[in-house]
Amino acid sequence: MPTRPSKTDPVLLELPPLKVAVVRSVGDPNVVGEAVFKALYGCVYTLKFARKKAGLGDFKVGPVRARWPNAHLAPREQWEAIWALPVPDDVTALPQKIPTVSVTLETWPYGLVAQILHLGPYSAEGPTVQRLHAFIAEQGYELAGIHEEEYLTRPDAKEPRTIVRCEVRKIV
């Protein structure tokens, strides 16, 4: 009988496009994060309750995701982040809760991705990311998109759980 992969083993899978509410930031996430999260969660929860009140149905607010275009290239104070929360596909406008932080609507294409579950603090992700990159190369693929993380737990959780993901393409 074949062995079942561990939850922390890297995998390849196809993901459909995802409509998301987005906030872009530049800076140390520990410094800019508070404003980002107030704007993003304020927007999405306001949308959730307005839709429910209008009879348009309810939706579960899922885990926040972030894409990190330059985190491996720049000092922490210059990190670019693209923070997102999924919203229903039929959403066409978003309520703005924090006037100084714009929340926009995007559809993130995915397709083929490689991902791995990281257990532990964000500061210890390096070996997990290296495992994922090695797996991608071993499977005959290369990176085709921005490093993305999906935060399954709060940062202060006893054991934070983070999905580390990137789009990939076959090497030809």
Image (cartoon, rainbow, N blue to C red):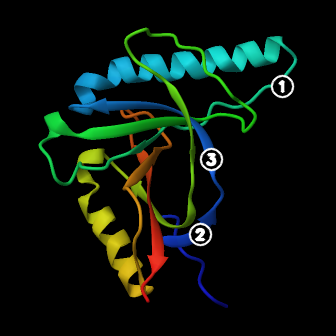
Camera-side mark, 3 or 1: 3
Corner quadrant of residue 93: top right
CA distance separating discs 3 and 1: 18 Å
Q: Name the residue under label 3.
A: 18
Give the image location of residue 143, x and y in percent.
Answer: 38, 70
Residue at 65 percent across and 34 percent down: it is 87
Can I make out residue 127 in this image? Answer: yes
Residue found at x 42% / y 49%: 149
| Element on which disc 2 rests | strand
Q: On the rendered structure, is 78 left or right of 167?
A: left
**Dot 2 corresponds to which residue?**
13
User: Tags 3 and 1 in contact by the CB under 8 Å rule?
Assistant: no
Please determine whether, in this image, residue 66 is positioned above or below residue 167. Answer: above
Sequence-first tag of 2 and 3: 2
Residue depicted at 22% across the width and 40% down the height: 79
Horizontal relation, residue 130 to residue 141: left or right? left
Res. 75 image quadrant: top left
In the rendered image, residue 9, in percent from the top left (x then y), is placed at 47, 71
Query: If the image is split into quadrants, where does the N terminus sit?
Result: bottom right
Name the amino acid type tagged 2: Leu
